[in-house]
Image (spheres, rainbow, N blue to C red):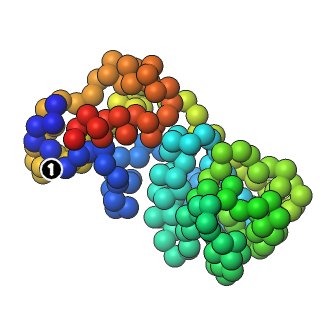
Amino acid sequence: MKTNLTYNPFSGLLAEDINAVLVPRFNMETLISKIKQPEELFTIEFLGKQGRGKTTHLRSVHQQLKGFPIVFLNAKSSASEVLNHTKEILFIDSIHHLKIKERLQLFKQKKTIVYTTHYTRKWECLIAKKKIYSLQFNGIEPETLQLILNKRLLLASPEGLECENLFSVKDSTVLIKKFKDNYRAIINHLYETYQ
């Protein structure tokens, strides 16, 4: 199964490889166009449980709008990391690490905010009088998973060589049965398999 690969195809993705393996859950061009509209300020939330692909999609959208900051928050992050940005578009991974008061302060700013979250922030946006577009990240079809996994295999294959052991829909179905829609758990499992 591991033959002819230049690296473990299920290791972390380089920024330049994200779009080569991503199968977008929404129309990327429509979303980018919406974000670029300066006359309307809003938030876009990528909503779903951990491991469903929210951060990967956020990074992909950000790559197409590189002139704007992206902030990856964690439990030790300071609110000033996001509140002090002056650009009109801001990308935030894991907005739940901010306190509600800080999120409200952020949502009241005159900028478009694209963020990932485990729980919807619609009430906070309503309080801040900011329009919200929520994109759900749940469920995965075997055909979609098959395409993503095979794109990763082909990316790790030496140039000009086809990968010998591509995933079938049956393989993807088995993985979904075991891990449900937890894409990160599937990738972690395959990383160990390809070590």
State the residue at coordinates (49%, 71%).
66
The location of residue 113, given as percent across then percent down, is 68, 64
Closest to the observer: 30 or 138? 138
- Tag 1: amino acid: Thr
Kindly identify the residue that appears in the image at 66 percent across and 45 percent down. Answer: 118
Left or right position of 43 against 46: right
Q: Is residue 62 visible?
A: yes
Q: Circle 1 sits on which residue?
A: 6
Residue drawn at (27%, 28%) of the image: 167
Q: Secondary structure at mark 1?
A: loop
Which residue is nearer to you in this view: 149 or 67?
149
- Residue 25 in sight from this viewpoint: no
Residue at 22 percent across and 30 percent down: it is: 166
Q: Position of residue 13 (x, y in %)?
A: 35, 54
Give how far across and how far down residue 63 sits, in percent: 46, 64
Q: Position of residue 77 (x, y in %)?
A: 62, 68
Quarter of the rendering containing residue 94 = bottom right
Image quarter of the C terminus: top left
